[in-house]
């Protein structure tokens, strides 16, 4: 049976070449995103492993109530996470130890680290007429 010059042979769904290329690129991007989150690629995997080690060492510090200085293993794990990656002596001074404690989320450490000082010349004077 034909209708106005069309043949009765049935065709499958035909996609233009542009659509096939876009579909292939989308599948490749999807596979790349899944690979990143699974830790397949080396730069991402090493960063995730370093962060996991830092979190594990932080858990020990937090469980002890954040008392005392961070351990040497925590300081080593903090290199590249909260401390400079090129630092030869992590946790060598009090400022770096404080950064590690803040990075671990020790309660009360961040508020103690930020202190306010009066501006030069002392505190501001009250407006005129107010005593």
Image: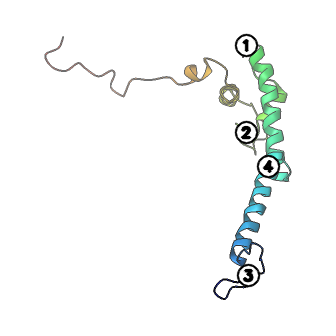
Under circle 2, the secondary element is loop
Q: Are marks 1 and 4 in contact (CB under 8 Å)?
A: no
Under circle 3, the secondary element is loop
69 to the left or right of 117: right
Under circle 1, the secondary element is loop
Give the x, y percent position of residue 95: 65, 29
Circle 1 residues within 10 Å: few <14, some 14–19, many ≥20: few
Quick check: can you spot residue 76?
A: no
Q: Earlier in the sequence, mark 2 or mark 4?
A: 4
Q: Give the label on residue 19, or none.
A: none
90 to the left or right of 118: right
Query: Mark 3 sits on what residue?
Result: 1
Q: CA distance from mark 3 to mark 2?
A: 73 Å
Circle 2 residues within 10 Å: few <14, some 14–19, many ≥20: some
Q: What's the residue at 70%, 26% (across, down)? A: 104
Q: Give the label on residue 44, or none.
A: 4
Q: Are marks 2 and 1 in contact (CB under 8 Å)?
A: no
Q: Earlier in the sequence, mark 4 or mark 3?
A: 3
Q: CA distance from mark 1 to mark 4?
A: 31 Å
Mark 1 vs mark 4, foreground winner is: 4
Q: CA distance from mark 1 to mark 3?
A: 85 Å
Q: What's the residue at 69%, 72% (across, down)? A: 19
Give the x, y percent position of residue 96: 69, 31
């Amino acid at each position: 049976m034909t209708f106005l010059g069309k043949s009765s042979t049935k065709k499958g769904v035909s996609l233009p070449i542009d659509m096939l290329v876009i579909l292939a690129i989308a599948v490749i991007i999807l596979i790349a995103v899944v690979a990143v989150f699974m830790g397949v690629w080396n730069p991402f995997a090493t960063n995730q492993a370093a962060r996991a080690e830092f979190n594990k060492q932080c858990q020990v510090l937090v469980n002890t109530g954040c008392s005392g200085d961070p351990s040497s293993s925590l300081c080593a794990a903090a290199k590249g996470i909260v401390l400079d990656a090129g630092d030869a002596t992590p946790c060598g001074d009090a400022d770096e130890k404080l950064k590690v404690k803040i990075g671990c989320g020790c309660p009360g450490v961040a508020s103690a680290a930020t202190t306010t000082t009066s501006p030069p010349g002392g505190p501001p004077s009250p407006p005129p007429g107010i005593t």
